[in-house]
Amino acid sequence: MNRFRTFAVMASTALVLALVLAACGGASTATPEAAKATAAPGAQVVTITSSEDGEKYSFNPSALTLKPGQQVVVRLVNAAGSTKSHGFQLKAADGTDIVKSEVVKAGASLDIPFTVPAAGKYQFLCFQRGHADRGQTGTLTSSAS
Ligand SMILES: [Cu+2]
């Protein structure tokens, strides 16, 4: 009986924690853009923060290494202190888009699901005018090993 009570208390504590975490997660991604994104179950979430430091705009991290064919979700978080909208665009070597997000306003975040392309190096960048020129680019390395 005592064991059962202990288990029941632990289970309800876990449930409360799960609800609190779910509520927090919902608050940080509750944007109309995020609601449209659908990710494959089990997709790996990779958080990238976009920000500006004077005239230098950046993604952090700016280097990703993922596996070919892997289902991922880039969670683009535009820093609350940001004054610009940013976006995420991943290009193939021939310049075509693998994925291109919608614009993410300051303080908002957006989940961008896609499938990691074949092994190789790919550039991602912010498609807002002038941002890539100010340094807002990164490299995705697709590697099986
Ligand atoms: Cu940008």
Image: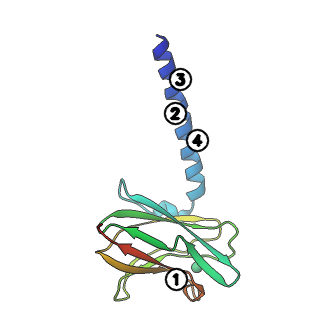
Query: In the image shown, does 5 or 30 lie closer to the viewer?
Result: 5
Per the model, the C-alpha gap separating discs 2 and 1 is 42 Å
Q: Amino acid at mark 1?
A: Phe
* Corner quadrant of residue 107: bottom right
Whichever of labels 4 and 1 marks the residue nearer the N terminus, that label is: 4
Whichever of labels 3 and 1 marks the residue nearer the N terminus, that label is: 3
Q: x, y percentage for residue 133?
A: 57, 89
Relative side of 114 to 46, left or right: left
Q: Which residue is mark 2?
A: 14
Q: Name the residue located 49 percent from the left edge and 28 percent from the top edge.
A: 11
Q: Which mark is residue 33?
A: none
Q: Which residue is mark 1?
A: 127
Q: Amino acid at mark 4?
A: Val
* Contact flag, marks 3 and 4 (Cβ < 8 Å): no
Query: As displayed, is residue 29 above or below residue 66?
Result: above
Per the model, the C-alpha gap separating discs 3 and 1 is 50 Å
Q: Which residue is mark 3?
A: 9
Instruction: Give the crowd class for mark 3: few <14, some 14-19, many >=20 residues within 10 Å.
Output: few
Q: Amino acid at mark 2?
A: Ala
